[in-house]
Amino acid sequence: MTQPNDHGDLKWGEEYKPEWGEWQSTVQAGGQRDASQLEAAKQLVNGRIMGRSEQMTIAELAVKVREGSRRHLARAITLVESSRVDDRAQAYELLREFRRLGPVGPPAVRVGVTGVPGAGKSTFIDALGVKLIEQGHKVAVLAVDPSSSKSGGSVLGDRTRMAALAVSDNAFIRPSPSGNHLGGVARATREAMLVAEAAGYDVVLIETVGVGQSEVAVAGMVDTFLLVTLARAGDQLQGIKKGILEMADVISVNKADGDNEAASRVAARELKSAMKLINSAPNARVPEVLTSSSYTGIGLMEVWEAVLEHREHLQQSGGLDRRRAVQQRDWMWSLIDGTLLDTLRQLPVVRNRKAEFERLVMSGDLSAVDAAEQVLELFGANVPQTWLS
Ligand SMILES: Nc1nc2c(ncn2[C@@H]2O[C@H](COP(=O)(O)OP(=O)(O)OP(=O)(O)O)[C@@H](O)[C@H]2O)c(=O)[nH]1
Ligand SMILES: [Mg+2]
């Protein structure tokens, strides 16, 4: 007999590699999964995640994570990153369990770190992270980079660029989950953040690529957005979309060392003036613009102070609670959107006829409106009866 929570019951999905969706729906050819299978799935953590020799329930896994076991933390994050149907059900159960157990401490400080490739984000996080650990913090480093699965470079890069942090017991570094679908990568990172916080990590730093869309996703998870930029002429405005400048809560002109030091200060001053123009509304908070070097360490803690000040300001004004409330609301909708879309696209009746519909629309034999209507009718007639459980 296979494990009750094994994937074997999902015959139609076995060789199917999701093209768009990151996590598979709970739909299968004949309808929904058996209720007893679902219950079993919630109880014993998938052997594939835990290793066959260790059997443990989701509730036990939650306790181990909260006790600070790194091995269980890594397993729990592997679970939430998985896109398999059975893993998704367990991942949501794990998050429910954390919620039932209540917070481990005050809310973690969540910071998004963005900037063009090569701006020095990883090196900055490494150097800053070591200092924060010296202050007694536990630091989790996560990443949102939907391109990382294509290049494969970022995994290697993060591990080697964060060498000092990587050896610390109070740091946990997780490269971007793979997948070229931003929604799925962002979902996995958000859930990994919740797992790390349950394990007592009180600082979460999320590195992202600085090209636009990923920042919007990360802004939906963090309290403060830090933009790491460079002094090289025009760099601070080139390559960084204006929208990202508008999102930044704190900016640091990085690599302010050696020959670059003076130019960095000039660039910071110029950027400060530019930011005043961008945030010209009477009560707008103009982001702090500082300089930093991960090589000399100069300016790192000042940047961190500015991050904390921004957060403090948010907290005082009630903005932090509001921001987090809005993030919860948006998370709900992104779970609904993502699940609906993935379910629709993975529904066998839709998948089997996808090519046919596309051909008819492209040849002009069927209008886009009529085709959409028919696909949605197929969906309506075959909706599953369970979703996230
Ligand atoms: N001079 C100087 N060089 C730095 C500093 N920080 C990083 N670098 C160098 O800049 C290069 C890129 O650093 P990373 O930390 O990998 O930059 P990143 O922004 O994380 O890059 P991606 O993850 O590829 O987007 C590396 O060669 C670093 O050694 C710094 O403070 N001063
Ligand atoms: Mg990096």
Image (cartoon, rainbow, N blue to C red):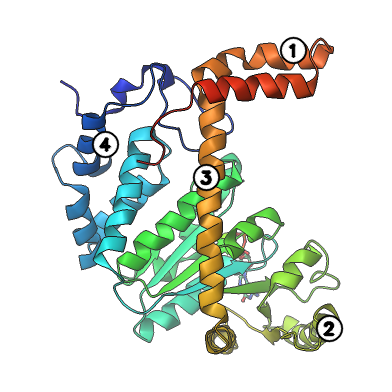
Amino acid marked by disc 2: Ser
Provide the secondary structure element on which disc 1 rests: helix
Amino acid marked by disc 3: Ile
- The answer for how far apart the CA atoms under marks 1 and 4 are is 40 Å
Provide the secondary structure element on which disc 3 rests: helix
Q: Is residue 54 above or below residue 238?
A: above
In the foreground, 70 or 6: 6
Image location (x, y in percent) of residue 18: 52, 29
Quadrant for ligand 2?
bottom right
Foreground: disc 2 or disc 4: 2
- The answer for how far apart the CA atoms under marks 3 and 2 are is 36 Å
Of mark 3 and mark 4, the one earlier in the sequence is 4
Amino acid marked by disc 4: Arg
Numbered label attached to residue 48: 4
* Residue at numbered disc 1: 359
Foreground: disc 3 or disc 2: 3
In the foreground, 237 or 356: 356
Q: Quadrant of residue 247?
A: bottom right
Q: Is residue 194 above or below residue 337?
A: below
Of mark 3 and mark 1, the one earlier in the sequence is 3
